[in-house]
Structure formats: C-alpha cells, structure tokens
Image: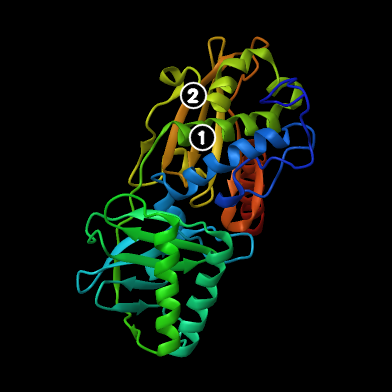
Amino acid sequence: MCIYFGDTPDLTYKKREHIFPAGLGGTVTLPQGWVSDQANELFSSMEGELMHDSLLALDRYLFGPGDRRGKASKSNVTVGVQDDGKVALSYLSMGKPHLIDQVYLRTENAVVSAQDDGSDADLIKKRIGNALRKFEAQSRFVFLPCPDMAAEDLLIGAHDGKVFVACGGERPSGDRVYDAIRKILGGFQSGELNRDSQHIRQKHVLTENGNIARMYAKTGMNALARLRGYKYAAHPAFDRIKRWIVSGENDDEFNYLPSISAERSRLAYALPEDAHFCVFTQIGDEIRALVCFYGRYTRQFTFGQAPDAGDFKYPEGYICDWKNKAEYTLAEHIENLVSGRRTRLKNNN
C-alpha cells in the first residue's frame, strides 16, 4: 500500500522515492514499495516548480547542488534583456546569466546570438541548424510570451533538446514557427545571418504557490517515514495532510507562505552550512513538523494527531547535508558533534 495513494488499485512500485528531492541534493531513498510510481510521477512536476520557480531556486542557482552528472544547476530558459536593450533567451546558473543559441527573426533581418563557449560562427550555425531541424519532426516548442517584442517578430532558440519561441501577443501557430525555422535554415545556407553576442540581464520571476508548499510537506512526510517507519507514516492520523499533498484538498488549512530569513535560522547554525532538514515535535497530542531548505526557507505544518501518546518526547529530525552528499538523523548529528568534542578534549589533554 502506498503511503500517499493508499490501496488505490493497479499501483506499481518500480521506483524509489527520495526523502529530499534529488534536484536539491537528496541521495537517500525510502525502501521500494513504500511510495508508488504513480505518486512519484505526480510529485515530479511539482518538485520541478520547487526547484525552478520558488524563492529557494535562487539559492539553488547560486550555490548548488548541480545535477546528477555533476553539472551546475540551471534555471528554466526565460526572456532576458541584453546591454543594448534587445531581448534574448537565457538561463541562470551559479549566479550568472547565460545566453542560449538563438535567432531573432525580424521582417528585415535575422540576428544570431549564441552561448559563449568559444565556438566559431560556422559551428554555431551548424549547432543551431541541427537543433531546429529536429523541430520539423517533433513540431513542439516552449512558448515564452514577451510583450516587449513586436507582434510580427519571432525569437527562436534551442537548448537541451528543446525549441523555445518568444514573441509578442498570443502563442504562434506551429505553421508560423515552422515557416520561420525554414527561413532561418535558408539564411544559414546563404550566409546572410550575422552573429550577435552580448551580456544579458535575465528577467526570472520567482513565486510561491500551493504545489510548492505541498512539496515542503511531502519532504516532511518522507522524513517522518524514514524516522518512524512505513506503518507509522501510513497511519490514518496523517490522512488529512496527505490528501492535501496529493490533491490540494484543504489548501487553506495547510498552505502558508514560507518564513525566509536573511541569515540561517538559529537551528541551522548547529547544522552543516546550507543543509536541508526536517524536525518533528509533539505539542499536546499533535505532531508538528518544521521543514527547512538551505537553512533559510522554512514552513511549519501540523501533521495530525499523534498515533500514540508521547510519540515525540524530544525533538527528532532528519538532515540532508547535500554539500557532503550525506544524510543522517538529528540524533546521529548530535552524537557526532559530542564525539568530536570528546576527541578534541582528549587530544588537548
């Protein structure tokens, strides 16, 4: 039975659920059979919003972690502004905006802008051309509305196997984009396109919504399962918040904006720098959870009535030290701190 979907028929369990999102550096998973593939798939897109669109995304782009291949974290591609005031497609990584390969197609001309990787003009044209030719087979693109552009202009770029199209007004038709790409490819063959590469100021909008809040709570529920086991996490006492995590039901009860501190929270100062953590306490007969990312972005939840009286006599927690690729309980962390202090005292004596 799935912790989140319960005994829904036809669930499968081929994958494992990360306790902390892998995109935020989580490495430890819950045992196979605890969270269904269907729940995992549901959470995948919402975790994408957490990592790319929420307020904590800025810390992720500035400090990491990178992806599973060790590459730096990147924002979604958005429309930015170049030094000369012209718009361009770019993404943010490690605090620096980067152009993607693109062509600004106007009525009178077309201008090529490229990522600054040292490639010569011919290689850039070949790279853009190959990416845009794939569009002819897929006919799919990501639309980025841009009110600063003239309605008759198109900005077309390629990055990470996707085609991005920006323009003023409504989403352009596939036929219009197809014709524009054919014109670009024809221009490459005739050598009429010019290269233009400048610094860029990215206009990346960060926000908070219900899906992002639910991913904080989901991380907390995963951590609770890791600390107390499958049966405890699957207890009906937590059904109400799990229904919110899965469907958004009772959003007014659980969805609050995060508490954000300019510096790390007091608790975070006792933990590894920029670590993520979940801490659980019992107040009366209720289990309270504090979920924190990067030691600065915090949400608190009432998970439900404790299945047994005195479940949490003392605070318990689970920590993701993503910089060192390590995860451990709060008790283990305290024991390591105490052991280290004992070792230092012994060496000093």
Q: Is residue 17 left or right of residue 163?
A: right
In the image, is residue 219 above or below residue 190?
Answer: above
Q: Residue at x 41, y 62 (%)?
A: 177
Q: Amino acid at mark 2?
A: Phe
Q: Secondary structure at mark 1?
A: helix
Q: Residue at x 47, y 38 (%)?
A: 267
The reply to whether callout 2 and callout 1 are in contact (CB within 8 Å) is yes
For label 2, the residue is 301
Picture quarter containing residue 136? bottom right
Give residue 216's mark. Answer: 1
In the image, is residue 53 above or below residue 200?
Answer: above
- The picture places residue 245, in percent across and down from the top left corner, at 55, 27
Q: Residue at x 72, y 37 (%)?
A: 37
Q: Nearer the viewer, residue 328 or 336?
A: 328
Marks 2 and 1 sit apart, C-alpha to C-alpha, by: 9 Å
Residue 249 in sight in this render:
yes
